[in-house]
Image (cartoon, rainbow, N blue to C red):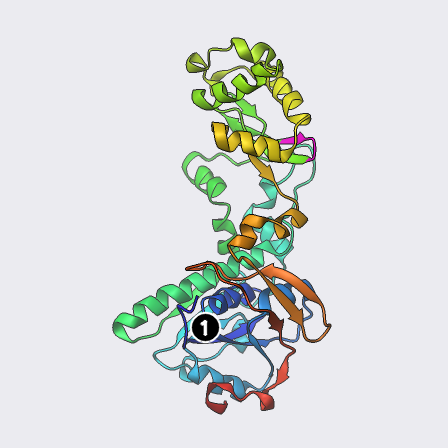
């Protein structure tokens, strides 16, 4: 998609804005990325910086010249290094990203953001330590908010021709992803707890992830009589429904059922799932309305015919290492089409950059 064709984006990257620049590049913007000197994950660089022009540049005057020609600036540097209003044209959109609302100069790790936002507090089993999400999810969440702010300001600029300055907090971006716990505390004073593989509804909790013959599926016993009848019918035909075949699902509220009864019913379902494969269970769910989904491992995601048909993945070659990888590409497509190979271009000296009118 080339929704942002002709839009120039200057990305002053430090990790917090990198994924936001990737999103704008996927939408067709011409993104020039200037990274700070801090060491960074090669995996992040490969995944979040392909499709950009990366510059080796630490000259404030040269950065100011690029800023003067940019439509959007994603500014992830610390407050003392930020561009001043005098260096930014009135029509430019300046998105300043900082770690904390109360401490704009501080650097922050993804782990710190995960912990302070509360996301780790609700992730994992209740009898084990909290867990962080894989990768650098808090950084990605911040980049998404930065790109969203830039797109909103760009929409406004098309009406009045004026740019805007917006400040995005990494901590608030991560907290927004934890919306349920924050809202629950604000309205009820309750603090959420880790429930692990349990969806708590009413007086009882139901399981969400189930092992099957060749992996795992996700499904929950909920107050949906039609769904439960459809599942139990297949189990009964196979002679594996047991007590479930005698339950009047139209008159049963799972949320009000004692936990010991729920556990007994779930052991029957677990035995049924355990001897069947993901594909078989998925097919039955799609045809009969079970509300079940297979859980794909990373290799299965890469090999998914559905995602390939959507053109999600693109081949990226790292010019520095020669490494090739299939990585998520376009955010969406208007129609199916083949994706050309891409490169994670090696950083070039500013003197070699001839784009943006020879800046």
In the depicted structure, whether residue 249 falls above or below residue 78: above
On screen, residue 338 above or below 51? above
- Residue occupying the point 29% across, 71% down: 158
Residue 333 coordinates in the image, percent (x, y) = 45, 59
Magenta-highlighted residues = 210-214
Residue 205 visible? The answer is yes
What secondary structure predominates along the stretch shown in magenta? Answer: strand
Residue found farthest to the top = 246
What is the secondary structure assignment of the residue under circle 1? Answer: loop
| Horizontal and vertical percent position of residue 288 | 48, 27
Dot 1, crowdedness within 10 Å: few (<14), some or many (≥20)? many
Please state which of residues 21 and 271 is positioned toward the viewer in this rendering. 271
Q: Residue at x 44, y 21 (%)?
A: 226
Left or right: residue 213 compared with residue 243 = right
Q: Is residue 155 left or right of residue 295?
A: left
Location of residue 212 (image quadrant)? top right
**Between 326 and 141, which is closer to the camera in this rendering?**
326
Q: Which residue is drawn at the image coordinates 62% and 65% (left, top)?
A: 315
Q: Is residue 101 visible?
A: no
Q: Which residue is mark 1?
A: 29
Q: Residue 200: x percent and y percent?
A: 53, 28
Residue 326 at x, y = what percent? 63, 60
Q: Residue at x 47, y 85 (%)?
A: 356
Q: Answer with left or right where residue 69 lies relative to residue 302.
A: left
Q: Is residue 334 above or below residue 207?
A: below
Residue 327's image quarter?
Answer: bottom right
Q: Residue furthest right?
A: 321
Magenta stretch: residue 111 in it?
no
């Amino acid at each position: 998609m080339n929704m942002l064709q002709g839009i120039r984006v200057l990305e002053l990257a430090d990790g917090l804005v990198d994924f936001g620049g990737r999103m704008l590049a996927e939408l067709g913007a011409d993104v020039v990325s200037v990274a700070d000197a801090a060491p960074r994950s090669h995996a992040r660089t490969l995944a979040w910086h392909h499709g950009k022009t990366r510059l080796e540049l630490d000259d404030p005057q040269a950065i100011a010249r690029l800023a003067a020609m940019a439509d959007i600036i994603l500014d992830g540097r610390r407050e003392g290094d930020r561009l001043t209003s005098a260096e930014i044209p009135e029509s430019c959109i300046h998105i300043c990203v900082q770690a904390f609302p109360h401490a704009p100069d501080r650097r922050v790790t993804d782990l710190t953001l995960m912990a302070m936002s509360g996301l780790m507090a609700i992730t994992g089993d209740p009898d084990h330590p909290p867990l962080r999400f894989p990768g650098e999810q808090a950084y990605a969440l911040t980049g998404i908010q930065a790109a969203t702010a830039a797109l909103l300001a760009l929409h406004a600029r098309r009406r009045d021709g004026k740019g805007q300055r917006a400040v995005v907090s990494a901590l608030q971006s991560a907290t927004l992803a934890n919306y349920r716990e924050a809202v629950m505390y604000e309205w009820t004073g309750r603090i959420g707890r880790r429930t692990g593989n349990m969806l708590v509804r009413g007086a009882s909790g139901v399981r969400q992830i189930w092992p099957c013959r060749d992996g795992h599926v996700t499904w929950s016993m909920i107050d949906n009589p039609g769904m439960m009848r459809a599942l139990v019918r297949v189990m009964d035909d196979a002679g594996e429904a047991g007590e479930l075949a005698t339950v009047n699902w139209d008159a049963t509220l799972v949320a009000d059922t004692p936990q010991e009864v729920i556990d007994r019913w779930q052991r029957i379902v677990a035995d049924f799932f355990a001897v069947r494969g993901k594909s078989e269970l998925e097919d039955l769910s799609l045809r009969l309305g079970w509300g079940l989904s297979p859980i794909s491992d990373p290799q299965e995601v890469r090999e998914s015919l559905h995602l390939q048909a959507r053109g999600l993945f693109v081949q990226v070659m790292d010019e520095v290492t020669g490494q090739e990888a299939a990585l998520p590409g376009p955010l969406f497509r208007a129609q199916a089409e083949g994706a050309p190979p891409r490169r994670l271009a090696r950083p070039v000296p500013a003197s070699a950059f001839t784009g943006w009118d020879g800046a």
